[in-house]
């Protein structure tokens, strides 16, 4: 009986250790110096920074002045864009109206104001609609709306 309990405990410990290690498997241990340097120079007051890598892009999520941001950099530390999570009411009215008409009953998961390295500003909204997550973007006036991605929820 004691041997069975010991085997079960070892199995549980092994499973827990494996599950804890999974998030580390797809990511290097350290953020490239060039990316970290650019981030720190752009957002010296950024806190609680977390990051992930997808292909050659680095996505850094952080807080500044009680607001949540995500900045995207290439592997050489070149800044691509930064998105600020905003209240849905801050989205331009034409964009809000479009979402309500095209996705009736849809639930806005989050809204963002995005600034790009070439100083362009646009808005991005992600909507849960039926069984899909749909991400749309519009120009700064809430017009020229396009679907960025659409897919089944997982």
Image (cartoon, rainbow, N blue to C red):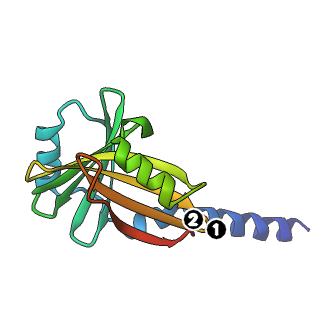
How many badges with numbers are in the image?
2
Q: Position of residue 107 (x, y in %)?
A: 56, 51
In the image, 12: left or right of 97? right
* SS for callout 2: helix
- 125 displayed left or right of 154: left
> Most extreme residue toward the top, as rendered?
65
Residue 52 sits in quarter = bottom left
Residue 19: mark in rendering: 2
Q: What's the mark number on residue 61?
A: none
**Quarter in which the C terminus is drawn:** bottom right
Residue furthest toward the right?
1
Name the spot of residue 148 as percent of width and height, x first: 34, 67
Q: Secondary structure at mark 1?
A: helix
Q: Residues within 10 Å of mark 1 (few under 14, many from 20)?
A: few
Question: Which residue is identified by label 1?
Answer: 15
Q: Which residue is depicted at the point 42% across and 36% down?
A: 89
Residue 55 point in image, percent of width and height = 26, 73
Residue 112: x %, y % from top left: 34, 46
Q: Nearer the viewer, residue 107 or 144?
A: 144
Which residue sits at x=29%, y=55%? 138
Q: Is residue 68 above or below residue 106?
A: above
**Where on the picture, by quarter, is residue 53?**
bottom left
Q: Nearer the viewer, residue 136 or 142?
A: 142
Circles 1 and 2 in contact, beta carbons < 8 Å: yes
The local crowd at label 2, few if under 14, some if 14 to 19, many if 20 or more residues have their Cα within 10 Å, is few
- The answer to which of 42 and 149 lies nearer the viewer is 149
Q: Which residue is rendered at x = 49% and y = 67% of the image? A: 22
**Disc 1 versus disc 2: distance between alpha carbons?**
6 Å
User: Quick one: quadrant of the N terminus?
Assistant: bottom right
């Amino acid at each position: 009986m004691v041997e069975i309990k010991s085997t079960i405990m070892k199995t549980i410990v092994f499973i827990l250790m494996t599950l804890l290690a999974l998030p580390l498997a797809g990511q290097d241990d350290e953020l490239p110096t060039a990316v970290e340097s650019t981030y720190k120079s752009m957002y010296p007051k950024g806190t609680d920074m977390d990051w992930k890598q997808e292909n050659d892009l680095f996505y850094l999520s952080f807080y500044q002045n009680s607001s949540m941001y995500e900045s995207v950099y290439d592997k050489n530390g070149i800044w691509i864009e930064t998105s600020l999570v905003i209240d849905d009411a801050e989205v331009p009215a034409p964009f809000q109206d479009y979402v309500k008409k095209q996705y009736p009953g849809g639930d806005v998961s989050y809204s963002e104001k995005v600034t790009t390295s070439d100083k362009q500003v646009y808005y991005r909204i992600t909507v849960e609609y039926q069984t899909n997550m749909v991400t749309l973007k519009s120009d700064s006036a809430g017009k020229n709306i396009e679907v960025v991605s659409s897919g089944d929820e997982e």
